[in-house]
Image (cartoon, rainbow, N blue to C red):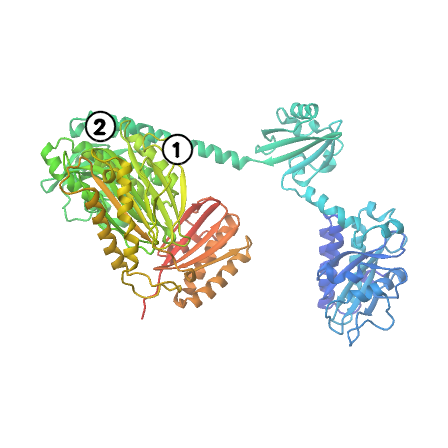
Amino acid sequence: MVPEPSRISAGPVTSTESSAEHRLSMLAAAGTGLTGGEALQYALDQAVAELTGLAGMAHWCGPSGGRPLHLAVVSGLPRAAFQGWEEIGADAPSGAPTHAVRDGTFAWMPVVDAAGSLPDDTHDTAASRSVTLSLPTATMVAAVPIPGPDAPLGALSVLTASGEPTAGQRAFLPAVARWAAQRVPQSTTAGVSRRWWREQPAGSYPLIAQEPVVHALRYLRDGFLVVDGDWRTSYINVEAERLLGPAEDVLGRVLWDGPAGRVPGLEARCRQAAADGAPVGCDVQWPTDERWYHIRLVPVPNGLTLYVTDVTETKIRVAQRAAAERATAQRTAPIGKLTSALTYAVTARDVVEVVAEYVLPPFDAAGLVVEVFESGRRHVVGSVGYSPDFLRGITETPQAHSSPFNDVLRTRLPIFMGSPAEYIALYPGMAERAAASGKQAWAFLPLIASGDPIGCCAISFHEPHHFTGEERALLTALSGLVGQALARARLYDTEHARAQELQRGLLPRALPSTPAVVAAARYLPARSGIGIGGDWYDVIPLSADRVALVIGDVMGHGLTEAATMGRLRTAVHTLADLDLPPDEILAHLNDLVSDLGDDLYATCLYAIYDPTTGLCFLASAGHPPPAIALPDGTVFFADLPPDPPLGAAEPPFSTIQLHLPEDSLLVLYTDGLVESATRDIDSGMAAVARCLTVGPGAFRTGSSVGPSGDGRAPRPDPCDAREHLDRLCDALTTTLLPAQELTTDDAALLIARVQRLAPQNIASWPLPAEPVAAGLARRHVREQLTAWHLDDLLMTTELLASELVGNVVRHAKGPIQLRLLLSRTLICEVFDGSQATPRIRRAAETDEGGRGLQLVAAFSQHWGARYTIDGKCIWTEQPLPAQP
């Protein structure tokens, strides 16, 4: 027998011997919980590491000590590299593994000689085939027997080029072999005949073949246990032990005799599953940790299997979602009542009382101030929750002074401040006023009527308040209702004189210029009646150079319809910022229109064009179909499903997908353009098609500014393109709405020419859902930005890509996709398979993480997230360096 390590060591303890002793102590502590195969693999890995080996292998021959030797596990190299060592026959010469088993002692022998062949005394064909790799000429094999009760069970071998083992290393090898032998199950080491080995395929050692299944069950994430026909537990895995207790206390006992007996109804369900022969599932609260688990009972021959899955977090999320839905319902339910109540509000004081009754409670608000600007000064119409002294101070604020009221009047945009710190940061000079109010959060909402801001509605809270996107949209919509109610007393001639100004003010003053589309639009008021309606259009830039094209029509005529159009347009902009798909946009607008009143309806068409793919996604709520003019002169109308108008529809809405070649025209219009008392809608659409037939052909002959950057035909100058579209708008309106014809409906027209992003300006890579993904992302960014000559953006883009990919690996799931777009800005996008919304959280000074999105927000000009069909995309934008 090989002596104990303590008997071999002599002289001073070297670092190698210290390492060996350290590994032996590690082995002594690592035995608990390892299966036989795991123990053998672990012992081999430690042996290779201790000898600084190139590779290692462990052979097995069974308790009889006979031949042949069969390869059980390997280390350091793929198993294919050990093909010739899979089986060493009984007639093999004295190679190192054979020598170690036969003589029961340490063996030290070469693998190959300087010429790359086996030594002269080695003629075994199987062993000869093993040398398939180019190993150093000094490679040797150190082998020791794996001891058994009567004879060696196998050999543990290490291939090394580091020289002959030290005394400590020589002592470590037999010690680790003994450690492994003690942990191989008795069923594996007993009763394995030579004839059985000859009947098995090479390398099919039973320990290794069976243990992955046992290991998988043992360490299954869910609890797993088996009970026999007498309800006694016959198997239990690690997770189930956590719930029921140690295996030695559970195995062989009736399931109900342990903690499981306190689970309500479990015994009855088990008996039901066994009697019915069908699986049964239920959710229960476990008595030991009070967490919720889903138990699935599956009958098997002579017993039952139980799968126990922790569903606590799922139940919490469901409860939170239900609570949020109830809160949303509580907030939105009074909106219809508010609209109705405002119609009966005669005085401004009545309006304040209605708002206090129907708006403050749903939002848990504590204060309200409604102010108007009349005759060059501020005037408080009414208030709730403020003292007279505080209200008197409001009117003393100079008009030129920086304040929320003045800024709301100036910008016509709401201002939300969730805490006194935010208030003071925006208005340092108003710190005393904020403290004197006694409030902790504010929403300043503009009141607009007849196209002019007439005042401000300030809603305040006793505690700091985080304004969600839903709350901002609702409060913004409410501000329009309140503004209309306050302006209802104006005379009819004043309303009529400012009606068109309101209409013009609500429509875009200028269409944005985007890389994806060049657009032109027209709005024509009715030439009879009040002359104002609810038609509108919009071009809204989205992330990744995508563009939303919107056109809508509030049914009816008058100031109310125009104001509703403004609210819808504001809501569309708010929803577009969330990057929602067209059908969801219309669903939210439908809810908004439904809340505004039972007799209010609107049609709307919402389209999103993606210049990276040329795809256009459209959804319509009762709106006429758009016309598409292709570059070859073909004109057709999109085949849209017949969804009802907003206010009468029942979501979901249908979405269609169109592929638009570059230079195609997308023509959106309202029914006032194509339908009149003398012409039905089909005749009007036919007239539109005739006008568009020559449009694309005439456009292709326009001037250009040179190559588009991707080898295709020269791209027209955007200025020339817009001039062409303006001429086309004029031609359509002149043909369909002659000047001498009185019209009773207003009309809107929007024409967009689509453009593609050059392929060489798009770069995309799949990434593994592993920690290495961040490094791969940085490498791709470096290579691509170098090719694009954007070295100035290398550092920030690498940081952004690394943080976004790292967040996906840590908090989401794959598949992961990285995409860079070179346009007017540099766009970096990371796609993943999770629809969890990222959020910036405030990290403490001692936190080691949690600042990823803070860095993304700090180093990018814009960033955001949008949902995709199978996950989401997080994107950033950076301005391009100035050209020299």
Instruction: For the C terminus, give its image quadrant.
Output: bottom left
Q: Secondary structure at mark 1?
A: loop
**Pointer 2 local density, CA inside 10 Å: few below 14, some 14–19, many at least 20:** many
Q: Nearer the viewer, residue 441 or 331?
A: 331
Residue highlighted by disc 1: 651
Q: Quadrant of residue 855?
A: bottom left
Q: Which mark is residue 255?
A: none
Give the residue at x 76% y 71%: 139
Q: Nearer the viewer, residue 714 or 213?
A: 714
Q: Secondary structure at mark 2?
A: helix
Q: Relative to 41, is 566 above or below? A: above
Q: Name the N-terminal-most of marks 2 and 1.
A: 2
Q: Nearer the viewer, mark 2 or mark 1?
A: 1
Q: Position of residue 664 (x, y in %)?
A: 34, 52
Q: Position of residue 623 (x, y in %)?
A: 31, 37
Q: Quadrant of residue 505?
A: top left
Taking the image as shown, residue 153 lies to the left or right of residue 876, namely right
Whole-angstrom CA distance, mark 2 to mark 1, is 28 Å
Q: Position of residue 737 (x, y in %)?
A: 19, 42
Residue highlighted by disc 2: 342
Work out whether residue 536 can be spotted.
yes
Work out whether residue 414 can be spotted.
no
* Residue situated furthest bottom in the rendering: 114
Taking the image as shown, residue 55 lies to the left or right of residue 663, namely right
